[in-house]
Amino acid sequence: MRQLMVGLGNPWPSPKMARHNLGTMVLEALAKQLDLEWSWWWSCWGWIAEEEELGFGFFLPRSFYNTSGWAVQRVMELHGLEAHQVLLLHDDLDLPPLCWSVLGGNHSDAGNRGVRGVRRAAGNVRRLRLGIGRPDGGDVGSYVLGKVEDELLERWQVAAQSGELLKIFGTEGYTRGRLEAAS
């Protein structure tokens, strides 16, 4: 495995369709498109799928969002990976819905405790920030745990099916973009 993709999200009892699980849902959509099989790894408390031809490994930690760093670190150790070989997919309040950004490892976590936990345990990993926008007033915690909009999830699923997501994965440095609305 040359590169590990990690989808941040919360396990049960958190609502599966929450905005905070967007990283997990996007990675699951890509694994489905590539017809990959998931296997449970007790040693790192998560699900692993590997795409040997592309050299990708996919990892879904089943620890809670903010405490996933140790699981990511464990997978990296087991596969001999370094931080620059990891791409962390996570929801981001600071980007509007359908917008995305790839960041190299040396950027701020912007208050995202899940990102902070992964960086503390595993180093300065690359990140694919998936925009969910900010709530109009109200509690941010309730917002990220609220149901992801159907259009947003469907558009990321289309990106996985069309190969658009794999192109985004291949970008280097700081890159931004926006998915077009699904038709």
Image (cartoon, rainbow, N blue to C red):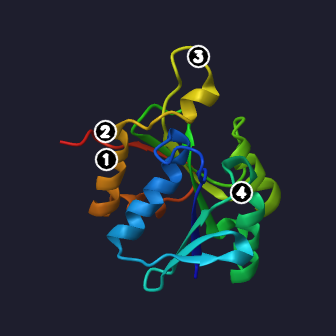
Q: CA distance from mark 3 to mark 4?
A: 26 Å
Which residue lies most toward the front here?
13
Q: Which residue is mark 2?
A: 151
- Rendered image quadrant of residue 113: top right
Which residue lies most toward the top here?
137
Q: CA distance from mark 4 to mark 2?
A: 27 Å
Question: Mark on residue 138?
Answer: 3
Circle nearer the N terminus (1, 3): 3
Which of 69/37 is in front? 37
**Horizontal arrangement in the rendering, residue 106 relative to residue 1 (left or right):** right
Q: CA distance from mark 4 to mark 1?
A: 26 Å
Q: Amino acid at mark 4?
A: Ser
Q: Amino acid at mark 1?
A: Glu
Q: CA distance from mark 3 to mark 2?
A: 22 Å
- The count of marks equals 4
- Position of residue 47 relative to residue 24, above or below, is below
